[in-house]
Image (spheres, rainbow, N blue to C red):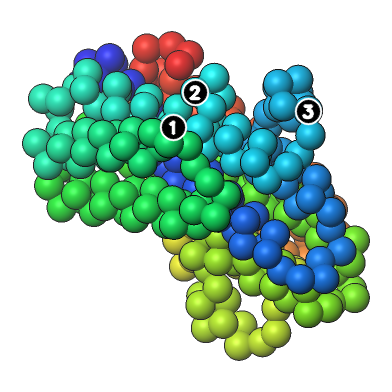
Amino acid sequence: MLSRTADHLYWMARYIERAENMARVLDVTYRMSLVANSPYDEAARWKPPVLIADDIEVFERDYGTYTAANVIRYMALDERNPSSIVSALGAARENARAVRVAMSSEMWETVNALWIELRQRIRGGLPEAEIGEFCDWVKSRSHLFRGVTFGTMLRDDGYKFVRIGSFVERADNTGRLLDAKFQLLLPDADQTTEVDYYEWSSLLRSVSAFEAYQKVFRDTLEPWKVAELLVLRDDMPRSLHACYDELAPILEQLCGRRGRECLRLAGENHARLHFGRMSDIVRTGLHAFLQDFIVRNNALGVEIQRTFLNGPS
């Protein structure tokens, strides 16, 4: 496969996953902002989406204060922000348009229709009261794209690069989301209140894991069990372990002599998750573990770019 084609497919998938992930973060932040008697002020409540996107300096320069209106505009509608929903979906559409012949016609129609409908939806702005419905729409269209891809795309190298892009991006977002929320909530983890319950349950709902937690642990919400589910459980689709269960074998199929470093990085990350124990992570510190994982996952993305694609995107 031409590296140019692989590059477009890889980034198309990453951008659609990024848009869905940002919609999940904004949705859970908005829902928690409606909880009465919260101990957090508006700035503390709305800072995590910007922290997760790693855009603190740019946001504070352009917007100043962490209000609902500012964060929603920046993370959903600001075309200057490469992590915003509108920027991610626009980039996904441009990448898809460049390689229409490398995908099924249904995939292209899904991405193109997504972009056209998005422009119609945001024409008059995005009121705060409509953010929940808007985020649900973004998530549903991302699910539709994955379903169409799985159901119609030939299982060739192009399909593998679509999958790689999705799981590298998903692993990065899950790690950042968990790290940001634990930093906000962990100081009070030993004094669980009703508000804390809603905070932890909202974190799980943001990654579609609330029902999974209930089935696995059959217990009240406990912070370290939430972390275990989203880090080490290989049967939780958006966990770090599950992402690398998908990435490692795909890269093993793609990597020849020139891809040995990709394979080494993926295998090393996978082994840390496959053989890791929550007790060891707690002892060394969850924040340190997640920060290290994010760096390692990013290093894998850079190596995939260098080895197979067209250089930095």
Secondary structure under the numbered disc 2 in the rendered image: loop
Residue drawn 72% across and 27% down?
Answer: 63
- Determine whether, in the image, residue 303 is placed left or right of residue 154: right
Q: Amino acid at mark 1?
A: Val
Location of residue 28 (image quadrant): bottom right
Contact (Cβ within 8 Å) of mark 2 with mark 3? no
Q: Amino acid at mark 3?
A: Gly
Q: Amino acid at mark 2?
A: Glu
Taking depth in this image into account, of 80 and 227 the one nearest to the observer is: 80
- Determine whether, in the image, residue 303 is placed left or right of residue 10: right
Q: Which residue is mark 2?
A: 79
Q: Would you call the spot at circle 3 few (<14 residues within 10 Å), some (14-19), or many (20 or more)?
A: few
Indicate which disc, 2 or 3, sits on the residue closer to the N terminus.
Answer: 3
Q: Would you call the spot at circle 1 few (<14 residues within 10 Å), some (14-19), or many (20 or more)?
A: many
- Disc ID at residue 64: 3
| Above or below, comparing residue 10 to residue 247 in the picture | above
Taking depth in this image into account, of 123 and 20 the one nearest to the observer is: 123
Indicate which disc, 1 or 2, sits on the residue closer to the N terminus.
Answer: 2
Residue drawn 44% across and 57% down?
Answer: 133
Contact (Cβ within 8 Å) of mark 3 with mark 1? no
Residue located farthest toward the top when viewing the structure as drawn: 311
